[in-house]
Amino acid sequence: MAQLPVALVTGAARGIGRSVARELAREGYHIAAVAPALAGDGERPGLAALCAEIEGLGGRCLPLAADVADPDTHVTLVQAVMDHLGRIDILVCRAEPDASPGRDILAAEPDTFDAVLAAGLRGPFFLGRRVATQMVADMHRLDDYRPMMVFITSIAARASSTDRPEYCISQAGLSMAAQVFAHRLAGEGVAVYEVRPGIIAAEMPAPERTMYDRLMADGRVPQLRWGEPRDVARCVRALARGDLAYATGSVLELSGGMQIRRL
């Protein structure tokens, strides 16, 4: 059985999820890294390089290919982590729904809506349920066990975008899911947090990046810089250390001050 704590990180092939996995490895965690496929493609570099880096830091890395949007995969996914690493101390659920095609809400299509909500809400919710069930059971099996779940959402959970309605709705729903889990699990000893990034420079298409550069220049982000995946990863690392142990249910927005109400 693993002696070091274990973090199960979804969306680990790129961007925020990949940065979180590396940061938690530096904190002393074994990592179960989940991506849609083990091998890379044009957008995702794959998990081999990530696992090599984690193992170079002294931890173990278990690469897992799974479609988190499909709840039928969750039992096998969690069982693989338990079989190889023995425990799950942290679930970091970084949902990565495929980008909606950028249609106005009045042109929204049911198939796109269903696909985005499956990846951005339904899958993470049921994975959270499966992991939470395991964590509650393990409270009586493991010593010095302080499990937690971290749902990484988006500023779209509270900020409307009329050409990405499906994504906004999925993130708002996942935000409430985090609250419901926090409410239900507080008495079980499982802490739950939502980390809500703002505009993060991670695999953003060039046209979209140009738009956000313009917003940045107009002062939309008070700190006048792009967020980086490591900003999110460091926040998760602080949670993993127990720095906010008495704050279950908290929403930690990392948006460079976009949450500030201004005249």
Image (cartoon, rainbow, N blue to C red):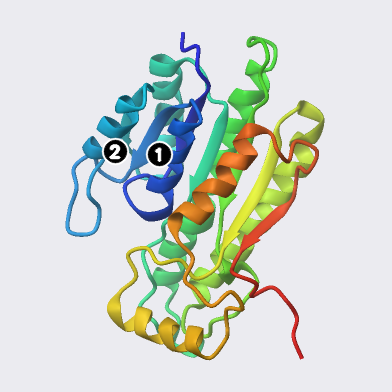
Q: Residue at x 67, y 56 (%)?
A: 252
Residue 195, position as x, y percentages in the image: 61, 54
Q: Is residue 231 above or below residue 215?
A: above
Q: Quadrant of the C terminus?
A: bottom right
Residue type at tag 1: Arg
Residue type at tag 2: Leu
Residue 202, position as x, y percentages in the image: 37, 63
Q: Please state which of residues 145 and 84 is positioned toward the viewer in this rendering.
A: 145
Residue under circle 1? 22
Q: Residue at x 70, y 43 (%)?
A: 181
Q: Is residue 208 above or below residue 151?
A: below
Residue 175, position as x, y percentages in the image: 65, 58
Find the distance from the CA under tag 1 to the CA under tag 2: 8 Å
Q: Please state which of residues 225 and 59 is positioned toward the viewer in this rendering.
A: 225
Q: Reading the chain from its start, which is encountered first: label 1 or label 2?
A: 1
Determine whether the residue tagged by mark 2 lies in a helix, strand or loop.
helix
Q: Residues within 10 Å of mark 1 (few under 14, many from 20)?
A: many
Q: Is residue 171 above or below residue 246?
A: below
Report how many numbered discs are placed on residues in the image. 2
Determine whether the residue tagged by mark 1 lies in a helix, strand or loop.
helix
Q: Residues within 10 Å of mark 2 (few under 14, many from 20)?
A: many
Question: Where on the picture, by quarter, is residue 90?
Answer: top right
Q: Please state which of residues 80 and 261 is positioned toward the viewer in this rendering.
A: 261
Q: Is residue 11 something one can see in this rendering?
A: no
Q: Residue at x 42, y 78 (%)?
A: 109
Residues at circles 1 and 2 in contact by the CB criterion of under 8 Å: yes
**For this view, does 16 lie left or right of residue 205?**
right
Q: Residue at x 51, y 55 (%)?
A: 231
Q: State the mark number for residue 50.
A: 2
Q: Is residue 133 something one can see in this rendering?
A: yes
Question: Where on the picture, by quarter, is residue 83?
Answer: top left
